[in-house]
Image (spheres, grey):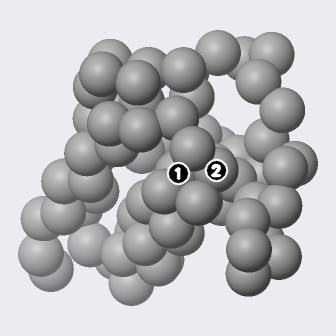
Amino acid sequence: MAKFLFVLSKKDVETATRCFQFARIAHEKNHEVDLFFIDDGVFWADKNRDLSIASTTGDCANDYLPYLVEQQVPIWI
């Protein structure tokens, strides 16, 4: 088992979606995962933020972030 730390510092959909996707994949493979929201990344901590905006690949933050929250993956701000 490895330890992963994902740092999100941007508020754009592309970057956040990939960050959440990689964090979910690592967690599903039973690795220890932590997320840090810094700089503009803190905008993703807003519970009212629209997570359904699609990235260029068609997926969105809503495909990954709820899983991380449900699994109680630590998210630091």
Most foreground residue, 54 or 47:
54
Mark 1 residue element:
helix
Q: Residue at x 73, y 81 (%)?
A: 57
Q: Residue at x 48, y 57 (%)?
A: 15
Residue type at mark 2: give it: Val
Numbered circle sitting on residue 54 = none
Among the 4 quarters of the image, the one containing residue 3: bottom left
| Residue 12 place in picture, x, y as percent | 57, 44
Most foreground residue, 42 or 73:
42
Q: Residue 66 vs residue 24: left or right?
A: right
Q: Does residue 77 lie above or below 6 as drawn?
A: above
- Look at the image and tell me in which quarter the C terminus lies: top left
Among the 4 quarters of the image, the one containing residue 49: top right
Most foreground residue, 56 or 6:
56
Q: CA distance from mark 2 to mark 1?
A: 5 Å
Q: Residue at x 74, y 74 (%)?
A: 56
* Contact between labelled residues 1 and 2, with CB atoms less than 8 Å apart: yes
Q: Residues within 10 Å of mark 1 (few under 14, many from 20)?
A: many
- Look at the image and tell me in which quarter the N terminus lies: bottom left
Q: Does residue 64 lie above or below 41 as drawn?
A: below
Numbered circle sitting on residue 13 = 2
Q: Residue 36 vs residue 18: left or right?
A: left
- Is residue 76 something that shows in the picture? no
Name the residue tied to disc 1. 16
